[in-house]
Image: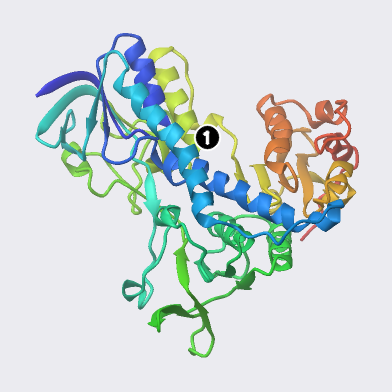
Amino acid sequence: MANFDAIIIGTGQAGPALARRLAGIGMKVAIVERGRFGGTCINTGCTPTKTLVASAYAAHTARRGAEFGFSGADVKVDMKRVKARKDHVVGLSNHGIERSLKSLENCRVFEGRARFVSPREVQVGEEVLSAGRIFINVGGRAAIPDIPGLDQVPYLTNSSIMDVDFLPRHLLVLGGSYIGLEFGQMYRRFGSEVTIVEIGPRLTPREDQDVSDAIAGFLAKEDVTLRLNATCLRVRNDGGDVVMTVDCDGTSEVRGSHLLIATGRRPNTDDLGLDRAGVNCDARGYITVDGELRTNVPGIWALGDCNGRGAFTHTSWNDYEIAAANLLDGDHRRVSDRITAYALYTDPPLGRCGMTEAEVRKSGRNALIGKIAMEDVSRAFEKSETEGFMKILVDADSKQILGASFLGMSGDEVIHCVLDTMYAKAPYTMLERAMHIHPTVAEFIPSILQDLAPLSAP
């Protein structure tokens, strides 16, 4: 048995940073990785998808050359070169993390599957590792729905589509939320026909209705076909094509050459032997943690996507910061300290923070709202990127900002003006009176806040 001060299972966003921090103060650390170093973000999430989005954006902009006063040859996408560019970007991060961990003093890397033997022991291959502190950072993977016929049809997930180096003739995307929308728009811009199938009545059901409507609008302008309210789904293979039935009477079908499943995520906790350690999970397999990310077993923490307290790279990184602050710095940080914030990387992107308009209405607060169309934002108009809008909600009594949705050019960056004000617990009037640079998208935030109106009844 090999004894350590700490064992970290997984090299996703939280794991390597925590290993460096613990090893840096002289702890003997073991870190375990059974797949590719860097976890979801580096290998199948943020890094590769945003690299692909950038290629798709460049192709789309080139096709719009006449709008900007130039013309060029017919734009044709070479998917092998697109994939090679993506692989190069991913490789720099992936190999960099692996090298840094393997050269880190006081840290030993184990490659293989980790399974608990007891609350203090983890087996990797033939070796048993022991430590007083164990951090689970195993991430998640695509959730595959139970659809009749799916086991007889080849399909792609957000992971396997990373190996695609060809252009699907017609890509069917099952799932009209964040992953599905990004890939759907991306592959339409690469040149595929795309149909997005969503079982609900609208796209992005977590967002407000106006956000969903605007996204549907700009996707339709790019000839992405949307099939909403798809019920009683069934799939079959017909001459090499994937055929999906999207209604209960079986009369409505969509046909494509390839199928992408984008219906959510599930945690990688089912083969960890958590029962041997006595670690509790919820009904979906997420590890139950408290506000400091401690499990029910003393000495075991769960960080990142596997704990159900956030499904983003930035929440995973913040998990590391919370654990390190409480364990090493004598600080008292909790998950409840953070404000909901994320982005959807369609074009234009959606930047979100705090409460949605629907949540504010449901709360019954005395609230104000301000909204501006992106076509009225000079910077967006100058760049001919006028889809979307920006809206901000504030509490009329406390003057605190409650939330914001920025669907438009640079919305994923501009949202931080609002987010940082919320963290500072400053009244919206501070941001209202700020002088922002012209011409920018952010300069219109004070204008939005100067034109607030009572949030009317729905």
- Position of residue 23 measured from the top left corner of the image (x, y, whole percent): 32, 14
Within 10 Å of disc 1 (Cα), the crowding (few <14, some 14-19, many 20+) is some
At x 73%, y 34%, the residue is 418
Q: How many marks?
A: 1
Q: Using the image, determine if residue 143 lies above or below residue 322.
A: below
Figure quadrant of residue 399? top right
Most extreme residue toward the top is 26
Q: Is residue 199 left or right of residue 276?
A: right
Indicate the quadrant containing the N terminus: top left, top right, bottom left or bottom right: top left
* Secondary structure state at the residue bearing disc 1: helix
- Position of residue 36 measured from the top left corner of the image (x, y, whole percent): 33, 39
At x 62%, y 53%, the residue is 56
Q: How is the image coloured?
A: rainbow
Closest to the observer, 186 or 403? 186
Q: Is residue 49 left or right of residue 454?
A: left
At x 49%, y 90%, the residue is 249
Figure quadrant of residue 60? bottom right
Q: Please give the residue where the numbered disc 1 appears in the rendered image.
A: 314
- Position of residue 245 measured from the top left corner of the image (x, y, whole percent): 48, 82
Q: What amino acid is at disc 1?
A: His
- Position of residue 242 measured from the top left corner of the image (x, y, whole percent): 44, 77
